[in-house]
Image (cartoon, helix red, strand yellow):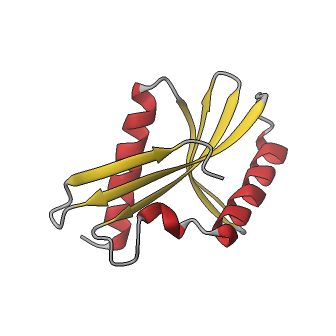
């Protein structure tokens, strides 16, 4: 399983997780020249930008730790671009992280959804 497949598996799991909890998925892999946000969702008047980090082991730390200050700043700038371009209706913005650990065979061993992560 390559990194792209691992990422897709994590994003698929996260989309399912969000759908089951009443979130509306607005965008998946929203790309602009500055970068990409994995998932943009809405729940009520809340607009949520979600970064999904999926790993097969903890050799490089907990997946969520990969969303460092630089990545957070980039995601916030992409969020500003999204809002100015798409003009979604919302009252609040939130930035969440889904952190997923997989087995070598691709089975989800553990996950954590971090609300208001940054």
Residue 71 placement, left or right of 29: right
Where residue 101 sits: x, y (%)? 31, 59
Q: How many marks?
A: 0
Instruction: Residue 74: name its quadrant.
Output: bottom right
> What residue is shown at x 73% (from left), y 64% (from top)?
73
> What residue is shown at x 39% (from left), y 36% (from top)?
17
Residue situated in front as seen by the camera: 81 or 115: 115
Residue 20 placement, left or right of 89: left
Residue situated in front as seen by the camera: 86 or 79: 79
Where residue 56 sits: x, y (%)? 28, 68
Where residue 97 sits: x, y (%)? 52, 51
Q: Quadrant of the N terminus?
A: bottom left
> What residue is shown at x 81% (from left), y 46% (from top)?
85
Which residue reaches farthest right?
84
> What residue is shown at x 38% (from left), y 61% (from top)?
54
Where residue 113 sits: x, y (%)? 45, 44
Which residue reaches farthest left?
105
């Amino acid at each position: 399983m390559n990194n792209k497949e691992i990422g897709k598996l994590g994003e698929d799991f996260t989309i399912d997780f969000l759908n089951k909890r009443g979130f509306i998925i607005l965008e998946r892999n929203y790309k602009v020249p500055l970068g990409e946000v994995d998932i943009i969702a809405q729940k009520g008047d809340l607009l949520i930008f979600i970064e999904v980090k999926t790993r097969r082991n903890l050799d490089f730390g907990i997946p969520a730790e990969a969303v460092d200050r630089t990545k957070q700043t980039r995601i916030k700038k992409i969020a500003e671009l999204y809002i100015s371009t798409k003009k979604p209706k919302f009252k609040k913005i939130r930035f969440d992280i889904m952190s997923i650990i997989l087995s070598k065979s691709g089975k989800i061993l553990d996950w954590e959804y971090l609300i208001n992560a940054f």
